[in-house]
Image: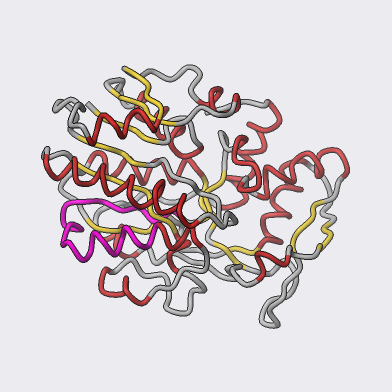
Amino acid sequence: MIVLTGAAGFIGSCLLAKLNEAGRKDIITVDHLDDDLKTKNLKGKRFLDYFDKKDFIKHVTSNQLSGDVKMILHIGACSSTILDDAKYYEENNFLYTKELAKWCLNHNAKFIYASSAATYGDGQQGYSDDHSFLKKYKPLNLYGESKHKFDLWALKEEFLDKFVGLKFFNVFGPNEHHKGAMRSVILKSYKGVAEEGIMRLFKSYDDNYADGEQKRDFIYIKDAVDMTMFFVENLHLAGIYNVGTGKARTWNDVANALFAAIGKEPEIEYIDMPVEIRDQYQYFTQADMTKIRQAGYTKPFMELEDSVADYAKYLERRSYI
């Protein structure tokens, strides 16, 4: 039996679909259905039971969770990078994760959890998932700090030889409609490109990067889920691993790919970046993929242009994974 938290969220719901595809339906799902769009993410999925995240953690801490659970896939978290509620991040992202991890340790269950590329901060220390570099990283926001704090706790307690932590980079694709301000630029821009023929990107405030030439490691949700399933299927593996492509692309590349997918000539407008995020903006991210490749993951990643074109089909049809 598997527990999947964040099951109605973006990555979680796509992972649930993949588990179903692999024949797994012995799944306890956990989330907080505060949005009809999240409810749509669960449509057609197969699972044993559903718990609200607040009720579920009570089951865990009171030791009422069935011992038949052999794995917890902890994908649920507050993924907003702009909130300023440190207490909420502490409780929701760090302490909640810690309780699930301790349960797994006490019940000999596998613990696979979502970390984040936000833990790397401004990138000056690189993007290696080698544990020896963990203490050097300085996240730029409370979200990144909350994820990094758990990574450091697991390192200190010497649990990283038992857990799997996945540092997701810029994931985009179907099932992200509910994410509000945290939706990908592709989703935010689709309607404007389709109806007005224009896409808006943030100006650069770093002289090293021209407008739209800031670079990120964009990874399509289907690739991110395949990489997660690699660890579900290879339980002997442990440690922190990057979930990216290892190939940084520019925002202009993203824009051009979206225009091509819709069949329009590119027209990009560069707009002011909100003041509140300028100091925590990542101008470059690129996952070091050495570790996961050495672990045996050999599947090639979709090219940005192909993945944006695939996503555009979902948006055109208003369909979900």
Image position, residue 182 (x, y; %): 61, 48
As drawn, the residue found furthest toward the bottom would be 207
Task: Please name whichever residue, 274 or 58, is drawn nearer the observer in this view of the structure.
Answer: 58
Location of the N terminus by quadrant is top left
Quarter of image, res 281: bottom right
Q: Seen in the image, is 44 located left or right of residue 308?
A: left
Image position, residue 51 (x, y; %): 37, 24
Q: How is the image coloured?
A: secondary structure
Q: Is residue 7 above or below residue 88?
A: above
Q: Is residue 274 magenta?
A: no
Residue at x 23% of width, y 59% of height: 154
Q: Seen in the image, is 192 located left or right of residue 240?
A: right
Q: Seen in the image, is 43 located left or right of residue 166?
A: right
Residue at x 16% of width, y 57% of height: 161
Residue at x 67% of width, y 55% of height: 254
Image position, residue 14 (x, y; %): 46, 33
Residue at x 53% of width, y 54% of height: 85
**Segment colored magenta:** 147-168
Q: Is residue 67 above or below residue 232?
A: above
Quarter of image, res 87: bottom left
As drawn, the residue found furthest toward the right would be 196
Task: Please name whichever residue, 60 or 257, is drawn nearer the observer in this view of the structure.
Answer: 60
Q: Is residue 163 magenta?
A: yes
Q: Is residue 49 above or below residue 118?
A: above
The number of numbered badges drawn on the structure is: 0
